[in-house]
Image: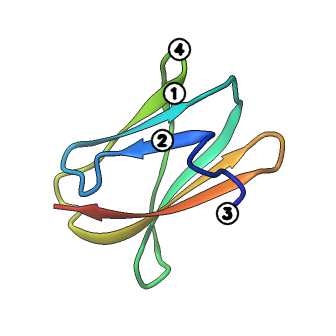
């Protein structure tokens, strides 16, 4: 995981309807994926970009432990465990 907490803040955790990702600087996001705990890809997302981050809308059918994977265009990757209720 090369995106440390000083670069990105991902909240809330646990999440319900949305996950917010805030960056301390300007970044270009290439892909966003949500994986179930067993490794199956649950979804890929088009981020709704805001000034310094984005919002990920979560389907109500998703519950449990997931891995959020954010790939930046400069090659850095962030993977975070997210609990969805």
Relative vertical location of residue 8 with respect to residue 36 in this rendering, above or below: above
Residue holding disc 4: 51
Q: How is the image coloured?
A: rainbow
Q: Of helix, strand and loop, which one carries label 3?
A: loop
Front one among 41 and 27: 27
Nearest to N terminus: mark 1 or mark 3: 3
Q: Of helix, strand and loop, which one carries label 2?
A: strand
Image spot of residue 7 (x, y percent): 63, 39
| Residue neighbourhood size for the residue with mark 2, other residues' Cα within 10 Å, grouped as few (<14), some (14–19), many (≥20) | some
Label 2–label 1 contact, CB within 8 A: yes
Nearest to N terminus: mark 2 or mark 1: 2
Nearest to N terminus: mark 4 or mark 2: 2
Relative vertical location of residue 24 with respect to residue 45 in this rendering, above or below: above
Name the disc covering residue 9, or none: 2
Image spot of residue 63 (x, y percent): 20, 66
Q: Residue furthest right?
A: 74
Q: Pick the quarter of the image with the N terminus.
A: bottom right
Residue holding disc 3: 1
């Amino acid at each position: 995981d090369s995106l440390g907490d000083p670069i990105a803040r991902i909240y809330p955790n646990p999440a319900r309807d949305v996950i917010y990702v805030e960056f301390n600087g300007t970044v270009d996001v290439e892909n966003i994926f949500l994986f179930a705990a067993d490794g199956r890809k649950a979804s890929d997302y088009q981020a709704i970009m805001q000034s310094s981050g984005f919002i990920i809308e979560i389907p109500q059918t998703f519950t449990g432990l997931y891995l959020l994977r954010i790939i930046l265009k400069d090659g850095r990757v962030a993977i975070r465990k997210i609990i969805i209720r």
